[in-house]
Image (cartoon, grey):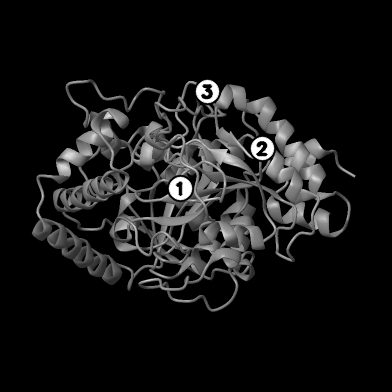
Amino acid sequence: MATLDDVAFLDAVAQSELVRQKEVKPIELVEAAIARIEQSNPALNAVVTPMYELARTAAVQKLPAGPFGGVPFLLKDLLASFAGVRMTLGSKLLQGFVPDHDSELVARYKRAGLIIVGKTNTPEFGILPTTEPLLFGPCRNPWNTDHTTGGSSGGSAAAVAAGMVPMAHGNDGGGSIRIPASCCGVFGLKPTRARNPLGPDFGDLMSGLVAEHALTRSVRDSAALLDATAGPDVGDPYWAPPPGRPYLQEVGADPGRLKIAFSTKAAADVTVHADCLQALEDTAKLCTELGHEVEEKNLPLDAEMLFNAFSVLWSAGTASTLKILGAAREQVEPLTWALREMSEKYSAADYILALQTLQSVSREVARFFRDYDILLTPTLAEPPLPLGSFDSPPDNPLHGLYRSSLFACFTPLCNMTGQPGMSVPLFWNAANLPVGSHFIGRFGDEATLFRLAAQLEAARPWGGRRPPAS
């Protein structure tokens, strides 16, 4: 049998199969994951709340008959409530908060047989596309520890890339799964709006911008996990169209000849780095070689209108969180408070108009997808930036948000429209930093994305790549 170190870099489906075949015990997988976290985490700062004893206890008990029985897993320290374990949301305001219940998503993870070994680093309230909270300090990229992991699911992406666990929870309100997937060289899918539940605490979050899922080493792990978690919760305000069959069955299925539009133009007038353009060119060429029809086509969107509408919803969502928590200025980071103050400029009418704007854009984008199966763009406008790139000076606390809009200008569209999108790790630049390719599918059509992603994975495997800090 392979050593446990070799097993660490198997995906979750393969690890669970070893458990089923009784070649390895759940407690062995858990102890090996804990050892890898203890070894790698001092350099990376990916795991901020260890849950080792809870994991050890779960591993020696009878596990549910789920698809991932005995596989170690990490939760992002944002939204995913685990009863009795602190949940900080990356903020010193909540460093002592302990929820008294599991979120529905966590309950589904447990029923799938996953064993949760800890919680991962995230920026305060998931606001920035980098993971550098004042509370815990920066999470470092396993490919180069001077660079960002992306955010806000940066701790989860770093942990998967470094081999701590085969997959980890993430959520995405403007790219927060796909951005760190690109920065850390792993697979990251944001599902269709409402595909996964936000309950019992939320039915809808940030006016539909936020979606839950995971960062994974393989495409099939993402598909199998979505099979285990997808579906509405009791009382949800709306839900996604149900799939025609399990997503895992799409992995390896023939995607057919897809019509793919590719675009180097972000909604905003942003200069895209040469490495990201090269990655896009390379991916478009690969898709052509695989038999797909690929042509350049830009979405005709009003960048300023989109940014303004997104800003209304993002600032209002931040302000509502702070109001619920009764936060004072000195209890949160300056950028977080500046967003709260920004929200005060807007009225209830502005909020409704912003929603209507994004709904109008969603219909326009849906018409675009009558002619195309997929839209391909860079995931990010730049490779992973050095840590500190999103810091805001005292006299301009919103600078980090502005800098974010230049870095992560491609991903928010999917959050605005509710469409599924994925970052696929197909390219590394001359500095050996990963640069993801971003694929957007039709609303409700994760199936096509999984079929294409599996085809790309087979043509250009990435699972064997190991970063220096692994």
Label at residue 177 = 1
Spot occupied by residue 7 in the image (x, y as percentages of width and height): 78, 43
Q: Are marks 2 and 1 in contact (CB under 8 Å)?
A: no
Image height of 93 relative to 355, above or below? above
* Amino acid identity at mark 1: Ile
The image position of residue 283, as x and y in percent, is 47, 48
The reply to whether discs 3 and 1 touch (Cβ–Cβ < 8 Å) is: no
Residue 284 in sight here: yes
Tell me which numbered mark, 3 or 1, is placed earlier along the sequence: 3
The residue drawn where x is 66% and y is 37% is 164
Residue lying at 70% horizontally and 45% vertically, measured from the top left = 55
Residue that badge 3 annotates: 145
Q: Secondary structure at mark 2?
A: loop
Nearer to me, 321 or 26:
321
**Which residue is located at x 9 percent, y 45 percent?**
345
Whole-Å distance between the Cαs marked 2 and 3?
A: 15 Å
Q: Secondary structure at mark 3?
A: loop
Mark 2–mark 1 distance (CA, rounded to whole Å)? 18 Å
Report the quarter where the N terminus lies: top right
Q: In the rendered structure, which amino acid carries the disc numbered 2?
A: Gly
Question: Please, what is the three-letter code of the amino acid marked with disc 3?
Answer: Thr
Residue 454 horizontal side relative to residue 329, left or right: right
Indicate whether 330 appears above or below 260: above
First of labels 2, 3 by sequence position: 3
Q: Which mark is residue 163?
A: 2
